[in-house]
Image: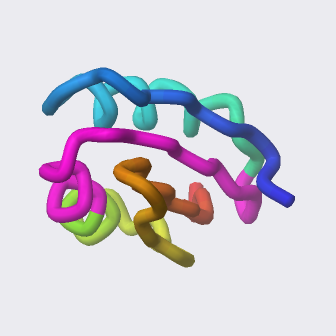
Amino acid sequence: MPDQTLDAKGLNCPLPILKAKKALKDVPTGGTLEILATDPGAVKDFEAFCRTTGNELVESGEDAGTYRFLIRHTG
C-alpha cells in the first residue's frame, strides 16, 4: 500500500513529473508514492526522473491505457 497516490491521468509531459516531484516532498524517506498517468511518454520520463533524483522506481506497469508507477522516496 503506497503512502500517497497521485492521479496524473489526462496530464501530458512534463506535468506528471512536476506533480510527482512536489508530492514526494510529503512522502517520508523510505515511503512510497504511487502515480497514475495516461501519457505513454511517462514511462521513459519516470525512469529518467528516478535515475537523476536517486529515488527508486519500485514498479511500473500499464493496464487499459493507465500507467502505474511506484516510487520509493530515498530522501
In the picture shown, does residue 7 fall above or below 69?
Answer: above
- Span of residues in magenta: 29-46
Q: Is residue 52 left or right of residue 30?
A: left
Q: Is residue 72 magenta?
A: no
Q: Is residue 22 left or right of residue 15?
A: right
In the picture shown, does residue 34 fall above or below 51?
Answer: above
For image coordinates 26% across by 68% down, the residue present is 47
- Quick one: 75 or 68, which is closer to the camera? 68
Query: Residue 8's spot in the image, x, y percent?
Result: 43, 28
Quadrant showing the C terminus = bottom right
For image coordinates 74% across by 39% down, the residue present is 4
**How many numbered circles does the render carry?**
0
Q: How is the image coloured?
A: rainbow
For image coordinates 44% across by 35% down, the residue present is 20
Query: Residue 58's spot in the image, x, y percent?
Result: 55, 77
The picture quadrant where one finds residue 72 is bottom right
